[in-house]
Amino acid sequence: MELSRRETLALGLGAAFLTIMPLRANAAAEDAIAAFTGGADVADGGVTLTAPEIAENGNTVPIEVRAPGAAAILIVAAGNPEPGVATFNFGPLAAEQAASTRIRLAGTQDVIAVAKMADGSFAKASATVKVTIGGCGG
């Protein structure tokens, strides 16, 4: 098989685009986390994120997050076109700082939960979810 110069150029540009695309998605997730935290340091631990290892359908992926002592929790799907999935706010009369929902994932990616604790510190947890059928147009 012989490729013309245009076909070779198109293949090269396509490969370059595919290598840059995941970086852009991760940058959007990092920007969402930075906006939530105000640029503060985020510690690992203190948050429990429960998500399936394998999701057969990306349209409805069940997740649950718990962070005792949290004032708010942000859920981010790093590979989605819009990474910010949900924010849960807890008042002083909340029985527990936990939430569960179903989210839509574009494909296999990391789901990150960032909690703002009552003392102003931040904690996070993450889980990788392998999606067999994408939910966001995939």
Image: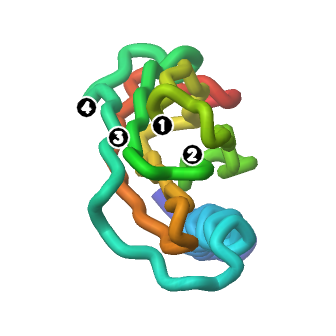
Q: CA distance from mark 3 to mark 1?
A: 12 Å
Identify residue for label 3: 49
The residue tagged with tag 3: helix, strand or loop? strand
Name the mark nearer the viewer: 2 or 1. Answer: 1
Identify residue for label 1: 97
Q: Position of residue 138 (x, y in %)?
A: 61, 30
Callout 4, which amino acid?
Glu
Q: Residue 53 bears which disc, if any?
A: 4
Say whether marks 4 and 1 touch (CB < 8 Å).
no
Q: CA distance from mark 2 to mark 1?
A: 14 Å
Residue 136: name its quadrant.
top right
Does residue 75 show up? yes
Q: Nearer the viewer, residue 94 or 36?
A: 94
Q: Position of residue 51 (x, y in %)?
A: 34, 31
Q: Nearer the viewer, residue 84 or 135?
A: 84
Q: CA distance from mark 4 to mark 1?
A: 23 Å
Q: CA distance from mark 4 to mark 3?
A: 12 Å
Identify residue for label 2: 75
Identify which residue is drawn at 57% across, 72% down. 120
Looking at the image, tell me whether mark 4 or mark 2 is earlier in sequence order: 4
Say whether marks 4 and 3 touch (CB < 8 Å).
no
Callout 2, which amino acid?
Ile
